[in-house]
Image (cartoon, rainbow, N blue to C red):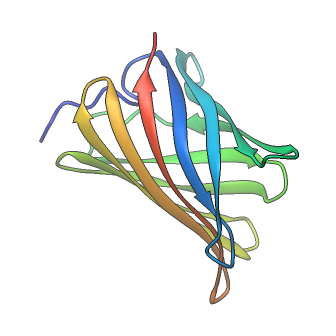
Amino acid sequence: MRSHSFLFEPARWSVQGKYYGMDGSSVPAAGETLVSHQADGWRCDGVTRLLWPEESLEFTMACLVRPFCGNDWTTWEADTPGFGIMHGKYVLAADAILCLGQTLGGAFTLSECLVMLDKSHYLSRGTIVKGSSKMSSWAVEFLRGD
């Protein structure tokens, strides 16, 4: 299993790529994620901005990740304005970190795959669905900035 840096090492990551709406239309996305290790767990706090020509829309997430403690999986909980409290699992799969989650009532589910290209560069592909309908998806890169 490859030694991951995302989540496992405190760092600031820039995020850039595309966000896709319900209809498949795309808009540029940019933001940052800060990973810090604290006494209560690992924090993964991020902001992503959708950059339409006439305006931007901002999404934030405040996530608490339980350390992996020798396992290849762990749990997390996040406060995501617009979706509410989400909870889920991170699972290590060779060069990828899989993220699975859902809102407390189960209305929204999240799936994301973070593929490590090297210790300073990850690709993220993911989606949020409601019932049987896609709400959004994304294709972004995480670049480590420390």
Q: Position of residue 133 (x, y in %)?
A: 66, 85
Picture layout, residue 88 above or below residue 108: above
Residue at the extreme left: 1
Number of callouts:
0
Q: Position of residue 59 (x, y in %)?
A: 76, 44
Locate the N terminus and report the quarter of the image it occupies. top left
Q: Position of residue 117 (x, y in %)?
A: 23, 37
Picture layout, residue 142 above or below residue 76: above
Residue at the extreme top: 146
Residue at the extreme front: 53
Left or right: residue 145 versus residue 80 is: left
Picture layout, residue 16 above or below residue 100: above
Q: Position of residue 37 (x, y in %)?
A: 51, 17
Q: Which residue corresponds to the image point at 63% horizontal and 44% vertical from the top-left?
A: 29
69 or 76, which is in the foreground? 76
Q: Which residue corresponds to the image point at 38% horizontal and 30% vertical from the top-left?
A: 6
77 or 18, which is in the foreground? 18
Residue at the extreme bottom: 132
Q: Which residue corresponds to the image point at 26% horizontal and 31% vertical from the top-left?
A: 4
Q: Which residue corresponds to the image point at 68% horizontal and 56% vertical from the top-left?
A: 86
Left or right: residue 24 versus residue 106 is: left
